[in-house]
């Protein structure tokens, strides 16, 4: 399926529904996550490797999954907010391609499918040289917001 353009995404936003703005959770703050971009089309964040390493001195795979799931879910909630809905994760998978010992990683979520019931996003994690460290795919269920 094709990804909607920013113009198409704007056309899908009914009047009266504000785009949801990302708020970091406790884990995101502890991991040092910073938001660079947030829109229906793309969410970009960064995170330091330092403080998120496992006992062998490498970026922890669980840290990659945690930040990737967060960024992909934020992207889904932004889309859901255009319909007055929210999103909950139902599936996430990841492939680790290479590791990192230092520096900063960039996490970028882009839509594969933006539906009215489900969304699927690809989340790429890269190092400072632009090399792919991890690829995630996350599917979220869109639901009515509970007041």
Image (cartoon, rainbow, N blue to C red):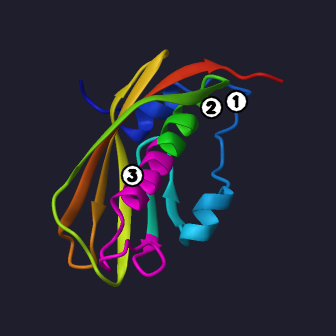
| Quadrant housing residue 7 | top left
- The first of marks 2 and 3 along the sequence is 3
Q: Which residues are magenta?
A: 47-72
Q: Where does residue 39 sit, x and y in percent of width and height?
A: 50, 47
Q: Earlier in the sequence, mark 3 or mark 1?
A: 1
Which residue corresponds to the image point at 64% horizontal and 40% vertical from the top-left?
Answer: 19
Q: Is residue 87 visible?
A: yes
Horizontal and vertical percent position of residue 13:
58, 27
- The image quarter containing residue 24 is bottom right
Give the number of the disc on residue 81: 2
> Which image quadrant: the N terminus?
top left
Where residue 17 is drawn, which disc sits there?
Answer: 1
**Answer yes or no: do the residues labelled 1 and 2 have beta carbons within 8 Å?**
yes
For disc 2, the neighbor class at 10 Å (few under 14, some 14 to 19, many from 20) is many
User: Residue at coordinates 61% horizontally, 69% vertically from top-left?
Assistant: 30
Foreground mark, 3 or 1?
3
* Disc 3 to disc 1, C-alpha distance: 30 Å
- Residue 66 is inside the magenta segment: yes
Q: Is there a contact, CB below 8 Å, between mark 3 and mark 1?
A: no
Name the mark on residue 86: none
Q: Nearer the viewer, mark 2 or mark 3?
A: 3
Q: Secondary structure at mark 3?
A: helix
Near mark 3 (Cα within 10 A), the count class, few <14, some 14-19 or many ≥20, is many
Q: Is residue 10 magenta?
A: no
Quarter of the figure with the C terminus: top right
Residue on which the image places disc 3: 65
Look at the numbered disc 1 and give the secondary structure of its residue: loop
């Amino acid at each position: 399926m094709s990804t909607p353009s920013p113009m198409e995404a704007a056309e899908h936003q009914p009047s009266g529904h504000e785009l949801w703005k990302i708020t970091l959770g406790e884990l995101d703050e502890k991991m040092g996550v910073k938001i660079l971009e947030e829109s229906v089309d793309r969410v970009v964040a960064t995170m330091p490797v330092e403080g998120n390493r496992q006992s062998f001195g490498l970026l922890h795979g669980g840290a990659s999954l945690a930040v990737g799931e967060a960024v992909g879910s934020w992207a889904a909630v932004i889309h859901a907010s255009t319909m007055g809905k929210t999103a909950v994760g139902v599936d996430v998978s990841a492939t680790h391609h290479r590791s990192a010992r230092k520096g900063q990683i960039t996490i970028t979520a882009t839509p594969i499918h933006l539906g009215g019931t489900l969304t699927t996003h690809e989340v790429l994690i890269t190092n400072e040289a632009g090399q792919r460290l991890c690829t995630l795919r996350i599917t979220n269920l869109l639901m009515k917001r509970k007041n």
